[in-house]
Image (spheres, helix red, strand yellow):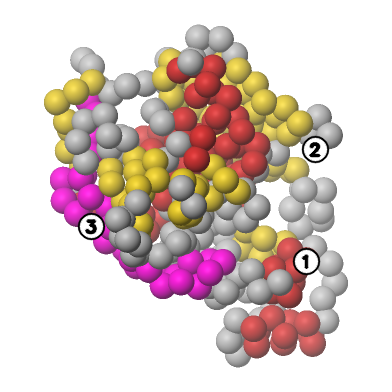
Amino acid sequence: MTEKQCTLKNRVSISGAGLHTRQCGTLTFNPAPVNSGIRFRRIDLDNQPIIEADADNVIDTARGTTLGKGGVKIFTVEHVLAALRGMGIDNVLIDINVEEMPIMDGSSKYFVEAIHKAGVIELDAPRNYLVVKEPISYRNDVLGIELTIEPCDHFEIDVKVKYNTQVLDEQTASLRDIKDFESEIAPCRTFVFLHELETLISRNLIKGGDLTNAIVFVNRKISAEELDHIAAFFKKPKVTVKEGGILNNVELYFDNEPARHKLLDVIGDLTLVGRPILGKVTAVKPGHFSNTSFARKIKHTLLY
């Protein structure tokens, strides 16, 4: 039986602050017709410009995946896109009234819950898969990054990360069936090392961070004064380091939650290919730049 394209049954909204801009905005998922794909609409701007979720519209990957078109930008789209792909949504128009997607808890969980609330319906058209017939690869030998996709009759993905630190070294994560995305991948939150957090704070680049939307790994000795400074920045009475080198802001859902989140990011960024993929992805040390470059290569290899 041929799979049908899907959209949402009803409109649904979710609100929150952007991680980097602290802009409090509302994201609204709207049902969309056959073959319209995933599109973002900036309803706060004149003429409500639309930006397609397309690898060719990626304009920055410094702190997440940013899309842009005609001078209009939308930041940090990867967790929203992962939720849509993971839940089998082919067509949706996403209204947003600020520049940046709400970060929520740093995962796809709340976007998945919104999709459940809206409901999913089939449309009267077959799903347009991108079928991988020969291996396609992206490599950066200097950084040890490699992403490969090879033929497979379904979508699956293996991810390996390596950070060469005592608190977080090598981890792997796998997804064999996209139907397991909701339970196995969607709740997994973004993470940051303490030194990265300190740099972001000093550059005023995490205006919307509040220690509930990231796992913080402490990979060096830290003084009580530094902990007090972090607590003050995030308006917390006290911050401590737990056994295992993690700040006491969160409890891990999985021992390999960082690798699972990297897998989530790969799914979100590969959604920018424009269609669901039939193929097996292997990703070693992935990041947003490599993910979106790989998505662009897959798109241009298979569609042109």
- Overall secondary structure of the magenta stretch? strand
Instruction: Say left or right for 3 vs 61.
Output: left
Question: How many numbered marks appear?
Answer: 3
Is residue 115 visible in the rendered image? The answer is: no
Give me the disc on residue 195. Answer: 1
Looking at the image, is 229 positioned above or below residue 120?
below
The disc, 3 or 2, on the residue closer to the chain's N-terminal end is 3
Amino acid type, mark 1: His
Tell me the residue at 21%/31% (across/down).
Answer: 34
Q: Which residues are magenta?
A: 4-31
Q: Residues within 10 Å of mark 1 (few under 14, many from 20)?
A: some
Please state, as top left, top right, bottom left or bottom right, where the N terminus lies in the image. Answer: top left
Kind of residue at badge 2: Leu
Look at 79% across and 85% down and name the residue there: 224
Q: Please tell me whether mark 2 sits on a helix, a strand or a loop.
A: loop
Q: Which residue is mark 2?
A: 143
78 in magenta: no
Q: Of the residues shown, which amino acid type is indicated by label 3?
A: Val
Residue 51 x %, y %:
40, 45
Q: Tag 3's secondary structure?
A: strand
The residue tagged 3 is 12
Depth order, front residue of 232/269: 269
Q: Is residue 24 magenta?
A: yes
C-alpha gap between disc 1 and disc 3: 38 Å
Question: Camera-side residue: 237 or 139?
Answer: 139
Measured in 3D between alpha carbons, the distance from the residue under mark 1 to the one under mark 2, in whole angstroms, is 20 Å
Q: Residue furthest top?
A: 133
Dot 2, crowdedness within 10 Å: few (<14), some or many (≥20)? few
Q: Is residue 124 above or below residue 160?
A: above
x, y percent for residue 2: 23, 17
Q: Which one is earlier in the sequence, the residue at label 1 or at label 2?
A: 2
- Which residue is located at x 55 percent, y 29 percent? 296
